[in-house]
């Protein structure tokens, strides 16, 4: 991946999914096939080594490969031809053993998987960063009062950390499921022309086993040439992680509205300016995550729509999944990286939160009032009275506290000395603290199991 | 679900997802809330029982609820109002305790989950039937020669059971993942107005715990009002199972072409006729599965596009997910049921398979020829010679065996006595038998873990 | 359409798309076929009348039809059977002429088209209402200052009418295109078993012509059994209108945030309340439109994914398009109706707009300042100076006007007497007035051409 | 567009949509802005010419632009900066006038439109080629008997040209609608910071008019920064054209099955081979079209999901539409080009068609038999008798003609002398000939209106 599309990608992820890397992975597959055959007496060892050594350094004319692939119906044909030509230069006798027993889809699917594995590792890293940042925010703001907003309307006081903990809960599930889907997709594709490894005779099993080991891939019970479920699943999980970053971006971009002003993406030179308006501070990171979240569902749907290929190898289903998955991974990495940058140095304005909490005439404390009234009046009567008080506050431009103190029915129900406490946010937090703790704890468990990525991923 | 849409649904699944069942599940939630509150001293026990008893028998005017819900912005408001009115008739004092501490989304999300759980169980059953049928076919036809078709062209001989084993491999993964996603989604939604269970004070945790137990749902670390990932994941897995059935249908409908004629959906009175053409035998079951597979990706994409709601409760994201998930489940159940019917009594025509195998002048044996030639000539020369032989066979209207026997270069490479064996399908099966065995074994393991659905699901 | 789904539908539209209406339209088709055949001597006139008269009153057992349709592979088979039985009761001889020469897809596709035409008329009406409301707002608020917001950040002053005029521009295009797509889709489907009307011999053309006239549908050059482009196009245009309503809803829901508070959906009894929070005034209409806008793209994608059916009649492509189009139309009608209600009585708070305009320390006037500075300093220097002034204002908590007056470089560039005018919104409106006028004028042209719907639609 | 993705693109289309072309179009916009400003006295003419002259030759470091764009939130900021620096080298005084009065989205949206216009012209050309090829096939095979297949089952005889005429009917509608959508999208985007062209004062209208003329774009009533309907519509029409090519590919790939063997994509060196199976002749062109048709719906859905951006400029909606539209255009061009290649030299095997027609024991003539029987027995009895005859033919392995001649009831109904004629395909063609003529005529009309693309497109 190069070019302007990099604006919407994480560079290390894009690098792992470049054309060059795909071709290198294809060469790596061919090297490993030659060696696995050699281990099983199907290819003379020196020829396998000759092939492997050319594979390591092989160079390809990408544009020409693309053109020939368009004609041939598959990239594998011109690729194998070009590779064979390079092997032939080094060792004419070895050339006859290139791609022995494999089919086009074997080399392409496996190479795609190899690239996705690396890029998926990067996505896991970025998710880790993002989750850690959300966890830190959740803990840091376990007691910072802000207002919950439902349907974009102020509802009740919550700690700001509660919002971060909800983000975190999505990432906790999403990271585990993405990893599982990535591992599930990290299967060797190796079946030869019809999927049965028919050309190796009895040795197919051993060759296949050796190949899977050499490439550190799992070996499915049966090839998946026309079983595209693992890619569809991986695509959906990628879209879900992208949506998780999009959720954070949605909230940040709303909090950054100057009329709200409760949190700001960190500023940085060159970030979030406007070519026409010098005063603006745009949610440039949130923009990246939201852009990705808007694109991911359609791409995931493409993979979900390619589950029913014809017979043993379909027409058009698998051939372009590299491109669809690449776009999905780039969207996902872009959004995660942007939000990790955003949360790690998020500027939280707790004073603004406090102002906003009280700005709506204390109406966000109406639940506390209603509950307290219910102790004396019963739920229905309390709800109705609270509604009337809220309306009066709105109509008369007073605070809820003022109208509450002035109302005779309310006065009977609540002693004056208890009224002030109803407008304190902290008691209204309910279980928020415990919920934050649990959400962070759940993440930490995932975190520690992810601490040694080398052994687990 | 009633009406003409039932044409494209499994009835038990549709029944579990009817409007009436959703309302009943909502009532079940309210009953359980009242009791959980009573257990914790928040509601007098007799009032809780009065509520619960009304909930069991509550009747609703669906059309009126829908109209009022449209105005209110949520079904929960008119529902709670109607329920409260019914409680009030039975026990005026109890009425004040209906829906205590819960929010609209709590009752709706939880009721949706309860209905999905039942319907999901039905989907698991259907998947079981379909997988069992595929496994049986895979075993029964472990040695039945047919031709593999790649890109809709005959490729190589395979046993017919290989095809069924590939279907099975998708179902093995898909069933496990669907179950996991269903369990993951089977979470209580319970947070009250802002998600923090603020109205219960210290008792929120105990109420929530009791409620989860009463409804046999898991309790998440933190409410998921604006964390819609579990529904998105469930939607994707549902689409994947639908695609798995679609894959089988794709193959069956192609095999049923009279020009191919290798397998037929079982005939039944009233199935697959034509209003205009009495001779037709339409793939009416495959049609159902393919129709579902065409609809599922767009529906799943809707859920993947609703991952970024605003703040603590979004606008439009969760409110319609019931309908989207219902459509997905109906599509899935319809396709699985149709394919289970199709595979359980599939009419396999092994004679037709044999005819087709040999019909293309033996060209599907070209790999065997090419491999044998390679032993003498090396891979490249063998491939080139085989290509020439195939072309000559096509041009001269002869079989590959005939031109092979007539070709002097080939004659040198292969003793005449070895030629006949090259045109025997069975040796060309490669590892197919072992692959089938592994795929069936993998399914059987899932099967036995699924044998006691009561304890596992 | 009945049941809880009505919450998310416009009722007249839902009524036009009910199961009963589809069956009635199918009967209407069969009546018209019988009469068209009678006109051409293929059916005795009295039999045609007998059929037609039964068709007008025919009753069907929907659930049974659905079940039989599931088995048959098409609703048409049990439908024709049930209809024939009813005709047979009235006139045994006439029964043999029911559905003469037609195929299943003829009656279903045509009936779908007939229902869509009515429902599409309703959508055009709703669009008219919505556009008229937007046009009225655009004109009424041609000079009401508010702030443009780009990337959710205040940008520059604009009149509020500008916002409404942008909404209107989408509706102007969208209404015309939807109508065109609806007319394009309003094609008779009539081809018989293979599409060639083979069973009528020479009379096919005349029968087909008579049928098209009787049903007021256009007649395509060739049947469209496997040409589903018109439905895909109609689906996309429906999604675009839904998105147009969604755009309005997005803006309204953001403007209704109490922190912004510039416009409010009209309140009404029972609208937008909360089961837990009596003080809330939820954007309940916007919610409906946003919910619809989230669902429409996936549904439209389903139709775009069904463009490649097999041969002369596909498997699964057309069979469920009724349901997909119905859902799309319901979503669209729901969103348009909600937004028409919202805009017709929108509560606009111009005082709040004015407050917000000046709240950001006058920074939204920075373009005016920068442009004025550029007259003296050149564009780059002016941009840089304005940026510094904005930063200083933010840092020191002053207004832009204050720092501008205090800055020596600025003082040299702008005479003090000219400064106040830079902070007047109206001069900053640019071409907004003319743009509003043009947008309204474009709509009015569409409006008057739509005034006589009977003759044009 | 470069790299391996070219395998799935038409090269001229890809060239028109390359990064370089987008940057050149952005420079073209800036040149035209400067000149339009100069025409209206806002920029000294010599400075405008200096800018324009640099724009023509401007070079950009794409990777660096992408990186800076990621930080800035928009490509326009680093682009304008880089361009300004190049202008400054040539003329320091002119540099201050670059991008005067425009906003980031103005330059990007307009540049996208300029590139799409060129690429869209290429798509129209390819559609023309494809339609012409389909029209030629329709005419050439106006009387070539083949079998209609519904639900993948043989139905009735039709001429092969009927199939091509159905393809053509989709292209006739699709080409007109795509052109209309392309023209509709070919709108200047020009509004400055808030869309109101506020920085030009009274001269905005004249500048905008001059700019639209210079770039040969239409001028909308009001800017479309947050009105993305035209791009959504264009995306949908692109997907529909892609689906039209996909429909042709679906049919070709099915016809190319050796078991059917009725038509073959033209063979060419390097086309459609297999790396493992020398005998294969893959539908390599159909593969390209089907791959594109599988990807297009998800991409179009992305655009349909971006219709509701926030306020005057959205977060993520417009920023990536270049990439989505590019992918859609490439898919579309790839599929059209492939199918044009496929149809222009399609190898039609009318002998095979004839064989297949008669292969199903003459059952495809059952409609003719049934109709003839109905003349004597009435429709119901005839249908029932035909059904029995068909079953007997299948059961006894006889042809329908044989069992018909042998059946006593049938013998009474049809004179023996009339039987042979019932098994002649041509009389069963019905209106096919007239339908073909109409479809071709409709295309020809579109063709001639498209003959002078320079003046119309």
Image (cartoon, coloured by chain):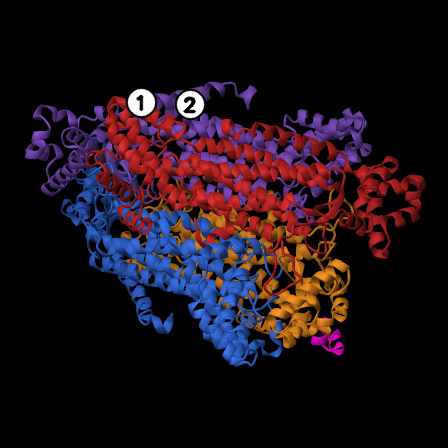
Chain colours: A orange, B blue, C red, D purple
Label 2 lies in what chain?
A: D
In the rendered image, which residue does mark 2 sit on? D443
**Rendering coords of residue D239 (x, y %):** 47, 38
Our reading of the magenta stretch's main secondary structure is helix
**Rendering coords of residue A160 (x, y %):** 67, 66
Q: Nearer the viewer, residue C259 or D243?
A: C259
In the picture, the quarter occupied by the N terminus of chain D is top right
Residue C409's disc is: none
| Residue C32 higher or lower than B103, as above or below | above
The reply, left or right, for residue A297 in relation to residue D218 is: left
| Residue B167 higher or lower than C448, as above or below | below
In the rendered image, which residue does mark 1 sit on? C206
- The magenta segment: A412-424
Judge whether residue A418 is colored magenta. Answer: yes
Mark 2 vs mark 1, CA separation in Å: 23 Å
SS assignment at label 2? helix
Q: Nearer the viewer, residue C233 or C329?
A: C329
């Amino acid at each position: 991946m190069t070019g302007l599309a990099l604006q919407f990608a994480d560079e290390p992820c894009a690098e792992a999914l470049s054309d060059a890397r795909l071709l290198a992975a294809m060469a790596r597959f061919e090297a490993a096939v030659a060696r696995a055959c050699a281990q099983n007496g199907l290819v003379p060892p020196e020829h396998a080594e000759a092939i492997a050594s050319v594979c390591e350094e092989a160079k390809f004319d990408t544009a020409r490969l693309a053109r020939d692939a368009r004609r041939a119906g598959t990239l594998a044909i011109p690729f194998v031809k070009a590779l064979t030509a390079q092997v032939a230069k080094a060792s004419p006798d070895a050339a006859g053993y290139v791609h022995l027993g494999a089919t086009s889809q074997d080399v392409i699917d496996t190479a795609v998987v190899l690239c996705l594995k690396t890029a998926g590792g990067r996505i896991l890293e970025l998710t880790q960063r993002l989750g850690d940042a959300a966890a830190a925010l959740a803990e840091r703001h376990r007691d910072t009062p802000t207002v919950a907003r439902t349907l974009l309307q102020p509802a009740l006081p919550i700690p700001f950390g509660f919002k971060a903990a909800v983000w975190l809960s999505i990432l906790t599930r999403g990271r585990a499921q993405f990893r599982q889907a990535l591992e599930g997709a990290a299967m060797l594709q190796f079946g030869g022309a019809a999927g049965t490894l028919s050309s190796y005779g009895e040795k197919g099993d051993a060759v296949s086993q050796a190949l899977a080991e050499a490439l550190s891939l799992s070996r499915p019970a049966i090839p998946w040439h026309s079983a595209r479920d693992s890619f569809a699943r991986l695509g959906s999980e990628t879209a879900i992680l992208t949506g998780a970053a999009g959720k954070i971006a949605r909230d940040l971009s709303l909090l950054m509205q100057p009329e709200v002003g409760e949190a700001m993406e960190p500023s940085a030179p060159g970030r979030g300016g406007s070519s026409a308006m010098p005063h603006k501070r745009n949610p440039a990171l949130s923009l990246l995550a939201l852009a990705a979240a808007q694109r991911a569902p359609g791409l995931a749907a493409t993979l979900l729509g390619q589950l029913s290929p014809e017979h043993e190898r379909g027409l058009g289903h698998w051939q372009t999944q590299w491109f669809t998955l690449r776009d999905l991974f780039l969207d996902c990495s872009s959004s995660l990286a942007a939000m990790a940058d955003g949360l790690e140095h998020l500027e939280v304005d707790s004073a603004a939160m406090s102002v906003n909490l009280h700005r709506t005439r204390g109406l966000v404390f109406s639940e506390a009032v209603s509950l307290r009234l219910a102790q004396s009046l019963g739920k229905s009567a309390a709800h109705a009275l609270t509604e009337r008080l809220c309306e009066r506050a709105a109509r008369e431009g007073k605070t809820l506290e003022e109208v509450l103190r002035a109302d005779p029915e309310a006065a009977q129900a609540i002693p004056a000395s208890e009224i002030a406490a109803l407008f304190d946010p902290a008691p209204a937090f309910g279980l928020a603290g415990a919920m934050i703790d649990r959400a962070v704890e759940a993440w930490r468990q995932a975190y520690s199991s992810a601490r040694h990525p080398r052994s687990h991923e």
